[in-house]
Image: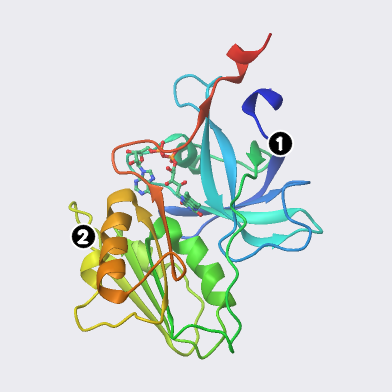
Amino acid sequence: MLRALGAKNHPATVTSIRWITDHMVRIDFQCDGILHQAGEKPSAWIRAWFPDLTHPSKMHQRGYTLLDADPAAGTFGLAFLVHDPAGPASTWARSAEVGDELLMTRLGGDGHDVATAEDSPRGYLLMGDVASWPAFTTLIDAIPVGVPVRVVIEHSNDDDRVLPLPTRDGLVVDWVRSTPDRRALVDAIDAADDYRGWHTWVTAESKATRLAKKRLAQEHAQSKSTMHTQAYWMAGRAMGRTAEPESQRV
Ligand SMILES: Cc1cc2nc3c(=O)[nH]c(=O)nc-3n(C[C@H](O)[C@H](O)[C@H](O)COP(=O)(O)OP(=O)(O)OC[C@H]3O[C@@H](n4cnc5c(N)ncnc54)[C@H](O)[C@@H]3O)c2cc1C
C-alpha cells in the first residue's frame, strides 16, 4: 500500500490532541524519517493521506504546516482548520484519537529562509486566511526583531481571532472578515500603503490569492523575487492528489 501511494511514505502516530478554538485542532505526531535532520525552515509543510469519506480504500493527499518540529525525536504538530463544508482531512482531524495513524510524505514543502537583520527587506506583509495561521506563526518567529511585519488574516468564525500569534515590536495584525467575493484580502491593501521594498506572502483561497497577488505586483512592484504566493485551497472544490492503493495492487 505504501508503494502504491507513490514517493516515500512514513507512518505517523497521533500522540496528543488539543482544540485551540472551536474550529482549529492541534494534533501532535511521532513519525520517524519525515523531518529534515538539519531542522525545518519556517512554513515547511508535509503531505498526509486521508481516507475518502465514502470509499475508505481511496486516499486523498492534503498539505499541512509543520509546527514545533523536533527532528531528533521525530515529533511535530499540525494544526487543522475544521471547516464546513468538510473534506477528508478536516473530517479526519475532527474525530482523531491518540494512537491513530496517518501516512505522510515530503515532496518539496521545505519552507522558506528568512533574511538576517542586515539583509532584511523594509518589512514583511503576510496575507492569508486561517489555514495560513500555522505558517504565519513560524514566519513571524523567524523574522528578525525590529523589522516591521503586517499580518492580514481573513476569517469566518468569531473565535478565529483568538488564535495566538507571537507578540513582538513592529507587528501589526489585522483580522478581516471573509466575504463571498473573496476580496477581503485585496481590499485590505490600502491605496495609501507602500509595499515597495517589502517581502510579501499570500497564501489563501485560490481567487483571494490571485486578487491580492495582482494588486501587489501592479501597484507595489512585487515580483517573483520578493513575493511568495500559493493557493492553499479552492472554494467549492477539493484540492490535492487522490490514489486508490487497493486497485493498484497486482
Ligand atoms: C502548503 C500548504 C500548507 C497548508 N497548511 C495548512 C495548515 O497548517 N492548516 C490547515 O488547516 N490547512 C492548511 N492548508 C490547507 C489545506 O491543505 C486545505 O484546506 C485542504 O484542502 C483541506 O482538505 P479537506 O480534505 O479538509 O478539504 P477538501 O476536500 O480539499 O475540500 C472540501 C471542501 O472544503 C472546502 N475547504 C477546503 N479547505 C478549506 C479552508 N481552509 N477553509 C474553508 N473551506 C475549505 C473546499 O472548498 C471544499 O468545498 C495548507 C495548504 C497548503 C497547500
Please report whichever mark, 2 or 1, sits nearer to the chain's N-terminal start. Answer: 1
Q: Is there CB contact under 8 Å for labels 2 and 1? A: no
Q: Position of residue 230 (x, y in %)?
A: 42, 54
Q: Which residue is mark 1?
A: 8
Element type at marker 1?
Answer: loop
For label 1, being within 8 Å of ligand 1 is answered: no
Element type at marker 2?
Answer: loop
Looking at the image, is 121 positioned above or below residue 248? below
Q: Nearer the viewer, residue 169 or 53?
A: 169
Q: Position of residue 218 (x, y in %)?
A: 26, 68
Looking at the image, is 31 positioned above or below residue 173? above
| Farthest residue, direction right | 72
Disc 2 residue type (three-letter): Arg
Looking at the image, is 36 positioned above or below residue 237? below
Give the position of the N terminus as an image quadrant.
top right
Label 2: few (<14), some (14–19) or many (≥20) C-alpha neighbours in 10 Å? some
Q: Residue at x 66, y 12 (%)?
A: 249
Q: Position of residue 36 (x, y in %)?
A: 74, 56
Give the Cα separation between the discs numbered 2 and 1: 39 Å
Specify how the rendered protein is coloured.
rainbow
Q: Which mark is residue 183?
A: 2
In the displayed structure, does residue 180 sit left or right of residue 213? left
Q: Which mark is residue 165?
A: none
Quadrant in the picture for residue 14: top right
Q: Position of residue 149 (x, y in %)?
A: 43, 81
Give the position of the C terminus as an image quadrant.
top right
Q: Nearer the viewer, residue 129 or 239?
A: 239
Q: Residue at x 53, y 36 (%)?
A: 61
In the displayed structure, does residue 215 sit left or right of residue 151? left
In the displayed structure, does residue 219 sit left or right of residue 204? left
